[in-house]
Amino acid sequence: MTAKERNITGSLDKPAFEELFRSFFPGLTLFALKYVPDQDTAKEIVHNVFLNLWEKREKVDTSSSLKSYLFTSVHNRCLNFIRDEKKFDRDETHLQRLDSTEFADGTDRLEVQELEERIYDALQALPEKCREVFTLNRFEGLKYAEVAEKLNISIKTVEAQMSKALKIMREKLADYLTILILFIINHMS
């Protein structure tokens, strides 16, 4: 434990916490950038780690190294972010395939139109904020950080809303996805 940590760990009151934040935020942000794609995401992750530390300050063992605790927490949140991004990317690719109408010829336009109507209905079934986040990300191509900034919400809120939207979309389109898959298989062979 460093001398600075020893001074801070005695009690995690507001001045001590602010000192801890000022001391470690830049280094933790650089550390997070080794795992995540941009500085906004890295800062958001580090900010959330500090927020969590403040909320749980009574339960955190201050006799052990806070530096280790902070770096481990940032590392774990970065890994969670990477896992969630892979899941969202996979879902996004799936929806982009649904949105593509290149496979349709003149006789298939009715099926495509029906699919588009089902997707539209599924979108309308989303809660308003959820639909807004989904539309900005999927149809306007904004990144999570851009959506968060535009709507004045956190990136975590964007991630949660996207997860909710994708779950609802999968549920609403589940019956139709089987038909769509059979349609694609029949027209590819």
Image (spheres, grey):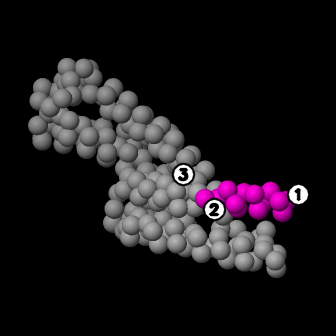
Q: Of marks 1 and 3, which one's residue comes earlier in the chain?
A: 3
Label 3: which secondary element: helix
Magenta stretch secondary structure, dominant: helix
Q: Residue at x 58, y 57 (%)?
A: 174
- Kind of residue at badge 3: Phe
User: Residue 29 sits in which quadrant?
Assistant: top left
Camera-near label (2 vs 3) is: 2
Depicted 122 relative to depicted 158: above or below: below
Label 2: which secondary element: helix
Q: Which residue was labeled with disc 3?
A: 88
Q: Of marks 2 and 3, which one's residue comes earlier in the chain?
A: 3
Q: Residue at x 26, y 27 (%)?
A: 66
Q: Position of residue 117 (x, y in %)?
A: 59, 75
35 relative position to 183: left or right: left
Q: Of marks 1 and 2, which one's residue comes earlier in the chain?
A: 2
Please tell me how crowded label 3 is: few (under 14), some (14-19), or many (20+) other residues with Cα within 10 Å: some
Q: Is residue 29 visible?
A: yes
163 relative position to 184: left or right: left
Q: Position of residue 176 (x, y in %)?
A: 63, 62
- Kind of residue at badge 1: Ser
Q: Which residue was labeled with disc 2?
A: 176
Q: CA distance from mark 2 to mark 3?
A: 21 Å
Using the image as rendered, state which of residue 41 and residue 79 is in the foreground. 79
43 relative position to 98: left or right: left
Q: Which residue was labeled with disc 1?
A: 189
Q: Position of residue 155 (x, y in %)?
A: 39, 55
Label 1: which secondary element: loop
Camera-near label (1 vs 3) is: 1
